[in-house]
Image (cartoon, helix red, strand yellow):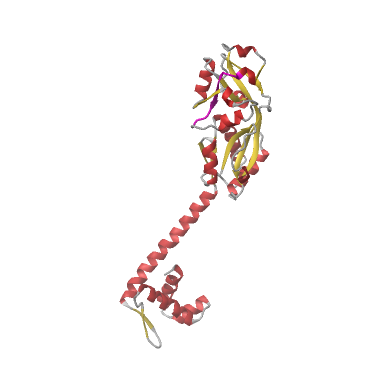
Amino acid sequence: MDSEQLKVFLAVVQQGSFGRVAEERYVTQRAVSRQISRLENEIGVKLFTRTTNSIRLTAAGKYFAGRAQEYLNNFDSTISELQNISNSDECTLYLSYFSIFDAYIMEKEIINYKRKKLLPEIRFITVEESVEHILADLVLNKLDCAYVNHYGSYNIPQASLYEFLPVYSNEMVLGISKENSLSKKKYIDEKDLEGRTLFYYSNENSDFMRKTFTATLHKSETKYEIKRVSSIEQLMTSTALNQGIAYIPKGLIDHIMQPDSEIVYRRFHSQKQNQNYSMQMIYLKNNHSQALKSFVSSVREFQV
């Protein structure tokens, strides 16, 4: 039983004739009769008493007419609600970011989109995640796009699935306590770091930053003690107390962090490659959301 059968049945009830319904629908009377017979066979009940020149609702038919109309009203209402939900989903973007600095760049681009009053009007939903979770959620279509830093020779797994849109670039630097003898140097090389503790930030138990950092090194990472800290505050406090050296994006210092008089920042010269990084907006190539297309277009034109 489908909604079209119910509509034909109710039309026959209202018109009292197979012929008049056939004329309204531009079909043969036989086609209408077949629809009604199929409906009766499916529910196992006679809905009409047929004579040579007329039809009449049975008692079951009268009862069914009321319920069929109620069903169709609910069905139409449900379809309308589903379409509204679908339209709402089309204009909702789910975004993720790795760190407070990524969030800062993302925030600027969302505000720019809203201020330009572009269409479609988008509802932005954001969440902080590790890079590993970001990549998994993109593949599972839980996210539309995300902001991540990319540097070093470490390659993002399954990179061919994604589009990468650079939105900001700068360099990675080392934060060093003034109590540390290395703070007197103009720049730091790999040999200076051997045997020392290096901190990187990740809000989750992620080793993405460690992998990207070690990918820039000439020597084995076993030469260094690399530790994760779970907050920017912990990163800076531990560094100021000379418990280790922080590996951080310079943009974070320029735009987000309050200056710490106990920490100096030095360039890191790796033998393998430079320490430039690119923050990138990443999304699946097969995501055809109109909201995403519009937002990406806006981001391409906007420079933080």
Nearer the observer, 264 or 48:
264
Where are the magenta residues, as a range?
193-203
Nearer the observer, 112 or 179:
179
- Residue at 68%, 24% (x, y): give it: 271
The reply to whether residue 21 is in sight is: yes
Instruction: Locate residue 283: give its quadrant.
Output: top right
- Residue at 40%, 87% (x, y): give it: 53
Q: Quadrant of the C terminus?
A: top right
Reply yes or no: does residue 196 show up in magenta.
yes
- Residue at 60%, 40% (x, y): give it: 282
- Residue at 38%, 68% (x, y): give it: 68
Q: Quadrant of the N terminus?
A: bottom left
Q: Position of residue 160 (x, y in %)?
A: 63, 45
Q: Position of residue 240 (x, y in %)?
A: 54, 16
Q: Residue furthest left?
A: 59
Reply yes or no: does residue 296 show up in magenta.
no
